[in-house]
Amino acid sequence: MSITHRRNDGPPAVAGRAAKPRWRARAAWPSSGRASPAGGLAAAPAGAAGFYIQEQSSLGAGRAYSGEAAETGVASIWWNPAAIARLRHPQAYAGAQAILVEAQVNDAGSTIQRPGQAVAPVGGEPGQFNPLQAGIAPSGAVAYPLGDRVVIGLSVTSPFNFTNKYADASWTRYDAVKSRVTDANVEILGAVRVTERLDLGLGLDAQYASATLTQALPNLSPLLPDARQRLSGGGWDYGWDVGAQYHPDDRLTLAASYRSRISHTLSGDVAVTGLLGPLAAANLATNGKATFDTPWIATLGARWQATDRLWLNAQVQRMGWSEFRAITVSLPGVTQVTPQDYRDTTTIAVGLDYAAAPDWTVRAGVQHDPTPTPDASRSTRLPDGDRWLFGLGASHRLSSGATIDVNADYIAFADSRVNRDDLAFAGTPVATRTALRGTVSGDAVVFGADLRWGF
């Protein structure tokens, strides 16, 4: 949360993607001139565009998530609840993905203008290396058949999860210092084999999100130390998903699924400390709420067994990022709505699986994943850009009947620019303008493994 007013009407400076989730909210002073804090949520995952983490199975990661909606088994529940409809025995899986990002975020002429003073450099450390912390995305699921045509299941995933940290004295400090977002999605689902060709599935989702976000606030004199603000909060919210798989013959599977948006409300604490002189009245510690929506996801997928050993995969996802249109922050006596202006995106992936030996399958794939963030309002909390993902993977069937999946992915981020204009203490004689301009470059590697077994 922040006593800063966001302005996004300036042209972009130079932008690339280095890190995935992002939330932001800002509030101005009321006309009375007394400062009132508001909320800032921002996040940046590495696995997919916006603040979505798609690393939910090694099986999928190894082929760049090109066939998950049309795959069968518990490892594909996140993409399609109908994936378990054809199981004849109980099945489970557990796994994790390690996400390692190398990124550089550099100052490119950021400025600050305090009241009655000339425009000056924002100062601080001009280069920030690897602000996105390495992380682990765990996932798991279990499914149990009830007769020949009905299967029930439970899955746990982490679709929005990251930690981003800049130095306290970074040039980014008036926009972001630390961002920690964790998320857990628990899904209860059921699938039905309606006919010999058609399977349907339905899931109900309970999603817990929590966040801790910090940044600096400028005092009126450059000789004074910066103030600090901190927001922390969390809460449970709910959604649903549906899916279908159609098997026109034994070699081809066509699939479609839809995952609903989830409207989140984070309840927590807001603290502002270190404001001096005329700004001291804005120091506070209070309770607050921030509300925002995560995107809906519509998926089309296909898997075709071209030969006895070769499967070809394709998948298209439409991400409803325009649902993340604004963040509303409510504090005692103050409500602030901050537009986000995200745009819907389309992700395309193709890949293959090849049975190299009776107990070994290898796979590969490529995915193009565009950013939903607008160039004119990109912040240092989410220096996001278009990305290409290249995946390699393998599966080994053990003598016990269990299967081990492993993957190694490389993600190439397009260079991007930070372009963020803020007006702190807006509407008062002490309004302070900051204009952040920066460049971002980087790439990432993802390593993962999971175990699938029947019982």
Image (cartoon, rainbow, N blue to C red):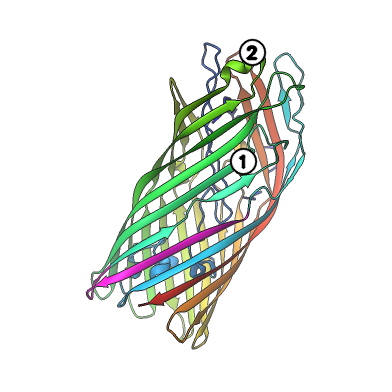
Residue range in magenta is 134-151
Residue type, numbered disc 1: Lys
- Image height check: is 299 above or below 282? below
Residue found 54% across the figure and 22% down from its top: 28
Q: Is residue 14 left or right of residue 290?
A: right
Residue for badge 2: 278
User: For residue 411, which quarter of the picture?
Assistant: bottom right
User: In the image shown, does 179 or 323 lie closer to the viewer?
Assistant: 179
x and y percent of residue 297 in the render?
42, 53
In the picture, residue 92 is in which quadrant?
Answer: bottom left
Q: Is residue 138 magenta?
A: yes
Name which residue type carries label 2: Pro
* CA distance for labels 2 and 1: 27 Å
| Relative image position of residue 239 (x, y in whole percent) | 35, 49
Residue 346 visible: yes
- Under circle 2, the secondary element is helix
Is 121 one of the magenta-colored residues? no
Residue placed most toward the observer, 264 or 81: 264
Residue 199 place in picture, x, y as percent: 29, 68
Task: Tell me if 269 is positioned left or right of 385 in this view.
Answer: left
Disc 1: which residue:
178
